Amino acid sequence: MIPNRVTLVEVGPRDGLQNEKQPVATEHKIALVQRLQGAGLREIEVTSFVSPKWVPQMADNAQVMAGIRREHGVRYSVLTPNLKGFDAALTCKPDEIVVFGAATEAFSQRNINCSIAESVERFAPVVTAARAAGIKVRGAVSCALGCPYQGEVSADEVERVIQLLKAVGVQHMGIADTIGVGTPRKAQAVLERALKHYPMDEVSGHFHDTYGQALSNIYACMEMGVHTFDASVAGLGGCPYAKGATGNVATEDVVFMLRSMGVETGIDLELLADAGGYLRTALDSPLESSVSRALGWAA
């Protein structure tokens, strides 16, 4: 049954911006978050607390968190892959932290130089510390629908990582098509595995639009009752390991589809498009969603 309401988790400020090669000014990041929440987004992934040596774009994480004007009812999340990152994030009082594990050993080794089991062991104390502090923990399985090194990924492989994450206390499970090769039935098959271990309210989908399948995948998951999805304003971001990747599914495109279906999101499409326009100007980039291009908002 298609849900009457869908929650969109805006990941542009973190997952979207972190792969931008040119530095993005702190004030632009703060302004983007303000515009997104002004458009009605109530779940925003703001930044990540990782080593600036590896992700220099996120070096101003504390300044961004301190600069945003927090609104009641908005949940601000941050990525904290290790205890050092969590300790730094704790002073900024995030509402939620994000951790993730890869679906394949090949991606885990190439991406973070350790096995899947070792990666989970690394952030297990992060999960424990966060929950002790009353902070929710959202987890994700990356490359769940395809791996740039291994190729096909089985639902069994994904379920194994889901179980490892649940065992260390992760409270929400996101299924991520990191390189955008997933198709509807594959997406449904993997989401079914997540729903064996987590309730519907704590399962979400994260789809990239590399092959133009993201909206189809979202719709297919909605047919199962899934009602939480990640999206990125103006389609910002993308996996550096995915050849020709066009980035995350654009939040504007998802909202347009849902609005036409009569599904509530609480998001103002015109204000969201304005946020995308601001981002394009700030980055001096042609980034745009299909909706903004079609309606002339990208001009």
Image: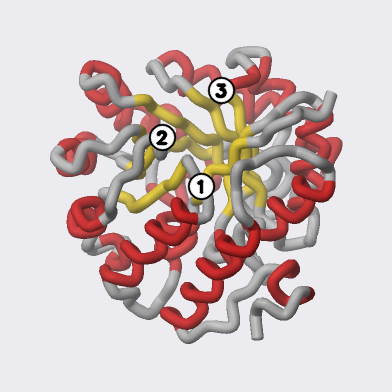
Q: Is residue 223 above or below residue 52?
A: above
Q: Horizontal and vertical percent for residue 280?
A: 51, 78
Marks 3 and 2 sit apart, C-alpha to C-alpha, by 18 Å
Residue at numbered disc 2: 73
What residue is at 48 percent from the left and 75 percent from the top?
Answer: 278
Labels 3 and 2: the sequence-earlier one:
2
Q: Quadrant of residue 185?
A: top right
Residue 143 makes an appearance in the image? no
Tag 3 and tag 2, C-beta contact below 8 Å: no
Q: Is residue 69 left or right of residue 235?
A: left
Q: Amino acid at mark 1?
A: Leu
Residue at numbered disc 1: 41
For numbered disc 2, what is the local secondary structure? loop
Q: Nearer the viewer, mark 3 or mark 1?
A: 1
Q: Quadrant of the C terminus?
A: bottom right
Q: Horizontal and vertical percent for residue 30?
A: 32, 62
Marks 3 and 1 sit apart, C-alpha to C-alpha, by 18 Å
Residue at numbered disc 3: 202
